[in-house]
Image (cartoon, rainbow, N blue to C red):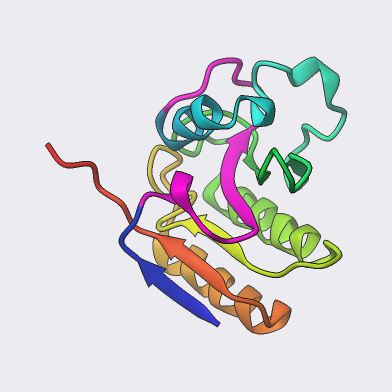
Amino acid sequence: MLSIVEEDITEAKEKYIVHQCNCITKYAKGLAKQIFDKFPYSNVYKNRERYSANIPGAIIVCGNGTDQRYVINLIGQFSAGKPTKSDTIENREGYFQSCLSEIAKIDNLESIAFPYRIGCGLAGGNWESYEKMLRNFAEEVKVPVVLYKFEEKK
């Protein structure tokens, strides 16, 4: 079941918050910065050397589910920003699909929050493709998958 809400994902009620990261950045921008500011233990950029899974298509699950909510860092691109000749849209979509497959393997997966247009903001992806992958994922895992669409008031 896939649904969309107009709320701040950092306030999500779902068991897991998912967001997209890259392999090389050491300082976060955009939504990653907001998530790392609110949940500093999930900052894989700051603590990058501690993790061996910083390869595209991998996930890094942070938090313990009690005093630290679960945050899934989805490594959906190699480099920061828009696609490049070596980090193409097609590669990124493949990495994203691999990450979804990894998330589907998590035990006791109850509910998941994703940002609306994940992979399509600063990362420059095609929302039509990402949304289709998310809809298929939601059908596969059979748990609530919620897309958080939030725009700060100006």
Say whether residue 22 is magenta. Answer: yes
Residue 46 placement (x, y as % from top left): 66, 16
Residue 90 placement (x, y as % from top left): 58, 54
56 vs 38: above or below: below
97 vs 55: above or below: below
Q: Please state which of residues 41 and 106 is positioned toward the viewer in this rendering.
A: 41
- Residue 22 visible from this viewpoint: yes
Residue 82 placement (x, y as % from top left): 44, 36
Question: Residue reaching furthest front?
Answer: 67
Residue 108 placement (x, y as % from top left): 82, 67
Quarter of the image where the C terminus is located: top left
Residue at 60%, 36% (x, y): give it.
21
Say whether residue 12 is magenta. Answer: yes
52 vs 57: above or below: above
Q: Is residue 67 left or right of residue 32?
A: right
Residue at 52%, 28% (x, y): give it.
80
- Residue 87 visible from this viewpoint: no
Residue at 55%, 82% (x, y): give it.
1
Q: What range is drawn magenta here?
A: 8-29
Quadrant of residue 74 in the image?
A: top right
